[in-house]
Amino acid sequence: MAEIIDGKAVAAEIVAKVTAHAASIAGTVVPGLATILVGEDPASQVYVASKSRMAKECGFHSVQHTLPREITQAELLALVDRLNNDPAIHGILVQLPLPDHIDSGAVIQAISPDKDVDGFHFINVGKLGTGEIDSAFVPCTPAGCMLLIDRVRGRDLSGLSAVVVGRSNIVGKPMANLLLAANATVTIAHSRTANLPEVVRQADIVVAAVGRPQMIKGDWIKPGATVIDVGINRIPAPEKGEGKTRLVGDVDFNSASKVAGAITPVPGGVGPMTIAMLMANTLTAACRAAGLEQPK
Ligand code: NDP
């Protein structure tokens, strides 16, 4: 049976470190995080509320902007511009997805790269792609996955093969870049990949970021592999009662945990790490703005 990687516990450690660091620099700078939520998507409301709450718990200055669905792109850009110029704000997070009438790309690129704590601005994407990781903001979910991998495999992944299933800009691609920077031999698989089970079976480290419930089965996994499941999928759970649902990952946990060496659960694996890394990025942004040494 695989070791279960406890993302909740690792995330709590990071949050405790961030909170202590924020307290130690409070005389010089109070990290400020601004979140922007457009519309009333229930999942986005939950995500933004938990990010704002966690920021407060870390001792940050936390401001949530909740805007009506009908807001124009120009109005949203004007808010981003105001926050870019607000010295009390060090991190700006625009919750995605935005309504169809707004060009998400234009909004993300309008955020100052120095306040882009989600790591989606081209400048930060480019820094990650060229290995300038120390001065970049790395997207929170893949950054969190790397810390979980570190717990099992250490920081240097020389000689190990990694397969990332999924090539999105927010998870798959930055994940692959981080694994490459850690010296893994990296394959990116996606919906057009042939013989996916065979490809996954080569991997010492599997990162699943697909969005398909329980797609990756135990017999796809190399014995002893480290399996990081990014997927969050809600499926019916009739065993809990009529109309009830439960969360599962992209990996079939029951079969995969019998073969893997270590595996993240869903929930309680990658999910809590994402918010913790957002706090870490906001602290880093504040330290950079104040000319303080970056937290390690
Ligand atoms: P996207 O939908 O943007 O990307 C999914 C990727 O999976 C695409 O590259 C797609 O390939 C690939 N894919 C789809 N179907 C298959 C298939 N049958 N075989 C192989 N590859 C396939 O999703 P995200 O990257 O945004 O998110 C992935 C998952 O991670 C989701 O479940 C999401 O909810 C979750 N997530 C969790 C977070 C967390 O904090 N834990 C944060 C962010 C996301 P192609 O490019 O060819 O279409």
Image: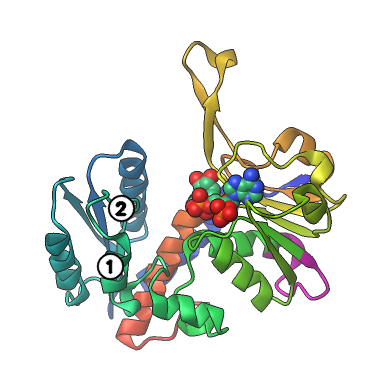
Most foreground residue, 143 or 232: 232
CB at mark 2 closer than 8 A to ligand 1?
no
Most foreground residue, 285 or 20: 285
The residues tagged by marks 1 and 2 sit, at their Cα atoms, a distance apart of 24 Å
CB at mark 1 closer than 8 A to ligand 1?
no
What color scheme is it? rainbow
User: Which amino acid lies under the numbered mark 1 shown in the image of this protein?
Assistant: Ala
Discs 1, 2 touching: Cβ within 8 Å: no
Kindly give the residue lying farthest to the bottom in the view shown.
Answer: 291
For the question of whether residue 2 can be seen, the reply is yes
Q: Where is residue 154 in the image (x, y as percent from the top left)?
A: 73, 69
**Rendered view: 85 above or below 18:** below
**Rendered view: 49 above or below 189:** above
Q: Position of residue 130 (x, y in %)?
A: 55, 84
Q: Position of residue 148 (x, y in %)?
A: 64, 59
For the question of whether residue 229 can be seen, the reply is no
State left or right for residue 109 relative to residue 66. Answer: right
* Quadrant showing the N terminus: top right
User: Badge 1 is on which residue?
Assistant: 106
> Are there few (<14), some (14-19), or many (20+) residues within 10 Å of tag 2?
many
Question: Residue at the spot x=17%, y=77% of the render?
Answer: 85
User: Which amino acid lies under the numbered mark 2 shown in the image of this protein?
Assistant: Ser
Question: Residue at the spot x=52%, y=78% of the render?
Answer: 128
Q: Does the magenta stretch include residue 184?
A: no
State left or right for residue 128 relative to residue 72. Answer: right
Q: Which mark is residue 52?
A: 2
**Rendered view: 85 above or below 4:** below
Q: Give the range drawn in magenta.
A: 150-161
